[in-house]
């Protein structure tokens, strides 16, 4: 066996890992969507026995949502939805990439396209999530509710690292695409 080839048992483990990661992506996305919906729908904390559960949209203080009128809540939802949609789109394509890996289509053009879309959508989601709070506060200020809303952007090192990693994935996928193109071009000359 060539030293560059993986044994079938190694591939089986990788395929099982792809399956586990796909389920983790599903759970992650479900939790993100649930938190988004609950953060705008809940009017105050919910009691769970001796504990209280309070979910706030990013950048909003405790009980700030319950002080908003319906128009402001709608604005908040509309401003936050693009980031959530971009994240959903990216996770769907990442899941499709993992499915293609499991089918053995590692360097197929469709797989490369899914991975590129996943990386690009994740970059877009991070940018949109970071723009959500200042844009929402700017719109709340224009709506004139009599409250002051600070317009500030908070970018953490974790988010910068995520942008860097997704950018690297985007670059690697471009290299995969170019390698695939050159391989097909060379096959045409043989």
Image (cartoon, helix red, strand yellow):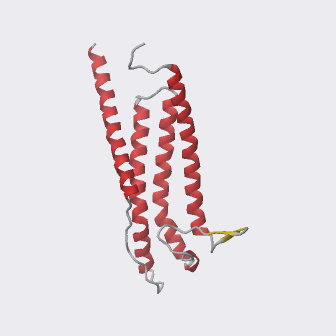
Q: Position of residue 153 (x, y in %)?
A: 37, 68
Q: Is residue 155 above or below residue 107?
A: below
Which residue lies at the image location 44% right of the left edge and 39% below the top edge?
A: 114
The location of residue 52, given as percent across then percent down, is 66, 70
Residue at 46% over, 27% down: 105
Q: Quadrant of the N terminus?
A: top left
Q: From the viewer's perspective, is residue 108 above or below residue 135?
A: above
Residue 84, percent across and down?
Answer: 49, 57
Image check: 22 left or right of 136? right
Image quadrant of residue 25?
top right
Q: Residue at x 48, y 26 (%)?
A: 104
Identify the residue at the far right of this view.
49
In which quarter of the view is residue 32 placed? bottom right
| Residue at (40% x, 62% y) in the render | 130
Q: Is 22 on the left-hand or right-hand side of 128? A: right
- Relative height, residue 28 to residue 75 (above, below): above
């Amino acid at each position: 066996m060539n030293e560059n080839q993986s044994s079938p048992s190694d591939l089986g483990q990788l395929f099982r890992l792809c399956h586990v990661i796909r389920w983790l992506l599903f759970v992650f996305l479900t939790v993100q969507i649930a938190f988004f919906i609950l953060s705008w729908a809940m009017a105050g904390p919910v009691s769970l026995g001796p504990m209280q559960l309070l979910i706030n949209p990013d950048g909003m203080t405790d009980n700030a949502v319950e002080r908003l009128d319906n128009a402001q809540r709608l604005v908040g939802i509309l401003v936050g939805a693009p980031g959530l949609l971009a994240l959903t789109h990216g996770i769907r394509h990442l899941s499709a990439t993992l499915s293609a890996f499991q089918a053995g289509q590692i360097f197929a053009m469709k797989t490369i396209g899914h991975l590129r879309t996943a990386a690009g959508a994740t970059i877009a989601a991070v940018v949109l999530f970071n723009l959500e709070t200042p844009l929402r506060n700017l719109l709340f200020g224009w709506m004139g509710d009599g409250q002051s809303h600070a317009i500030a952007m908070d970018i953490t090192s974790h988010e910068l690292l995520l942008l860097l990693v997704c950018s690297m994935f985007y670059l690697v996928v471009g290299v995969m695409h170019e390698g695939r193109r050159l391989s097909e071009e060379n096959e045409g000359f043989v």
